Image: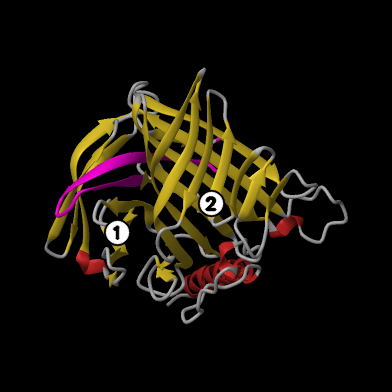
């Protein structure tokens, strides 16, 4: 080997080491996600401000006088270490974002709105110890035995109470949910399926009482997705017999499955953790967005071992463009499930136009 070649090899090795150290230093700023860490309630219902990213994600189906309606309410918390320790009270150490959407078949597309703010000053907060997150007059709070959300959006308003009928369902290994074969890509994660929903929805000038069923996901992590991951497919399904299913797969940039998993809990409350080889998402039909040109597999066959559910959307156009806030473009759709059993839920499709930014 010539001296020049040897120097070039050493230079590349030093650059690689510098990159690895920078990544480790960045990750070290956040609280870690480790196996064997038992979830504790009510503590873990609230915010975990030391972690990089956290969300409270509610999706559900409503029975309304105008017909079936899907809804989504999501609050995101993002830690910003670069602003921590600054003297100014206005330093954005914690950032909050919120998305809300209605899947209204009569309109034929999503109605949606969003909010963002830095935490503090009594105007925006994600509180520790209990579910209590808000941005101005948008809120999600566990109060008097029910999750209550109020979302006065642009052309719709949600005022819903969502009462748990079952215990929280830890995902993965007791709440440690792997997103890849190694432990470095993981989150803490639990779900609350089969929430009983009552309340009121206003669409433009029409106000109506509604009932339905919902699903809440609460997840927090500090690691980014694997470098070769583009996004994920996720489904949360409430079945008519009281059972529930969460299933996901992490997709590589070329479309193949990097990792998969989930949890199936029967109507009697017995839960079974699903491993990568047990979960398959098979596209049945696609839809192309007329706004972004992105093609999504909006109808899926979801296979778990020898059982198959066909997931069909309440309407095809359920694309949510949040690139102006969280930097994401995704399809978040109300679906009906048929096949092995019947039910209702949501299907989420991310990373179909470009790789997710986290």
Q: Position of residue 296 (x, y in %)?
A: 29, 38
Provide the residue designation for mark 2.
147
Q: Label 1: state its secondary structure.
A: strand
Q: Which residue is situated farthest in the right direction here?
A: 87
Counting residues from the N terminus, which is met first, the one under dot 2 or under dot 1?
2
Q: Do the residues under discs 2 and 1 have CB atoms within 8 angstroms?
A: no
**Mark 2 vs mark 1: in front:** 2
Q: Position of residue 127 (x, y in %)?
A: 67, 58
Provide the residue designation for mark 1.
245
In three-dimensional space, the C-alpha distance between marks 2 and 1, rounded to whole angstroms, equals 21 Å
Frontmost residue, 5 versus 252: 252
Residue drawn at x 18%, y 51% is 309
Frontmost residue, 156 versus 351: 156
Q: Quadrant of the N terminus?
A: bottom left
Of helix, strand and loop, which mostly describes the magenta segment?
strand
Q: Label 2: state its secondary structure.
A: strand
Residue drawn at x 39%, y 44% is 60
Q: Which mark is residue 168?
A: none
> Is residue 172 placed above or below 238 in the rendered structure?
below
Residue 98 quadrant: top right
Frontmost residue, 201 versus 129: 201
- Estimate how packed mark 1 is, as few (under 14), some (14 to 19) or many (20 or more) residues with alpha carbons within 10 Å: many
Q: Position of residue 124 (x, y in %)?
A: 71, 46
| Residue 170 lies in the magenta stretch | no
Q: Is residue 325 visible?
A: no
Q: Position of residue 319 (x, y in %)?
A: 39, 34
Frontmost residue, 250 versus 280: 280
Write the start and end of the magenta stretch as one range.
Answer: 324-348
Residue drawn at x 53%, y 64% is 221
> Is residue 101 placed above or below 32 in the rendered structure?
above
Residue drawn at x 20%, y 49% is 342
């Amino acid at each position: 080997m010539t001296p020049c070649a040897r120097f070039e090899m050493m230079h590349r090795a030093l650059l690689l080491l510098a990159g690895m150290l920078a990544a480790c230093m960045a990750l070290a700023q956040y609280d870690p996600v480790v196996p064997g860490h038992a979830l504790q309630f009510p503590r873990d219902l609230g915010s975990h401000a030391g972690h990089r990213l956290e969300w409270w994600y509610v999706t559900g189906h409503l029975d309304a006088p105008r017909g079936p309606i899907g809804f989504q309410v999501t609050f995101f918390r993002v830690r910003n270490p670069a602003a921590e320790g600054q003297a100014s009270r206005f330093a954005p150490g914690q950032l909050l974002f919120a998305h809300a959407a209605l899947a209204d078949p009569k309109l034929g597309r999503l109605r949606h709105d969003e909010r963002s703010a830095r935490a503090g000053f009594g105007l925006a907060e994600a509180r520790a110890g209990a579910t209590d997150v808000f941005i101005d007059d948008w809120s999600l709070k566990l109060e008097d035995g029910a999750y209550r959300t109020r979302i006065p959006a642009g052309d719709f308003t949600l005022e819903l109470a969502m009462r748990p009928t079952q215990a929280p369902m830890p995902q993965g290994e007791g709440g440690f949910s792997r997103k890849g074969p190694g432990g470095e890509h993981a989150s803490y994660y639990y779900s609350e399926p089969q929430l009983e929903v009552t309340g009121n929805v206003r669409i433009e000038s029409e106000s109506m009482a509604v009932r339905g069923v919902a699903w809440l996901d609460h997840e927090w992590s500090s690691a980014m997705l694997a470098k070769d991951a583009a996004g994920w497919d996720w489904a949360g399904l409430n079945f008519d017999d009281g059972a529930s299913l969460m299933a996901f797969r992490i997709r590589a940039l070329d479309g193949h499955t990097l990792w998969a998993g989930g949890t199936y809990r029967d109507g009697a409350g017995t839960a079974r953790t699903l491993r990568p080889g047990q979960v398959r998402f098979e596209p049945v039909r696609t839809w192309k967005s007329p706004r972004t040109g992105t093609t999504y597999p909006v109808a899926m066959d979801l296979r778990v071992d020898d059982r198959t559910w066909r997931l069909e959307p309440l309407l095809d156009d359920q694309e949510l463009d949040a690139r102006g806030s969280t930097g994401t473009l995704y399809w978040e759709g109300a679906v009906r499930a048929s096949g092995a059993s019947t039910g209702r839920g949501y299907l989420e499709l991310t990373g179909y136009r470009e790789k997710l930014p986290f």
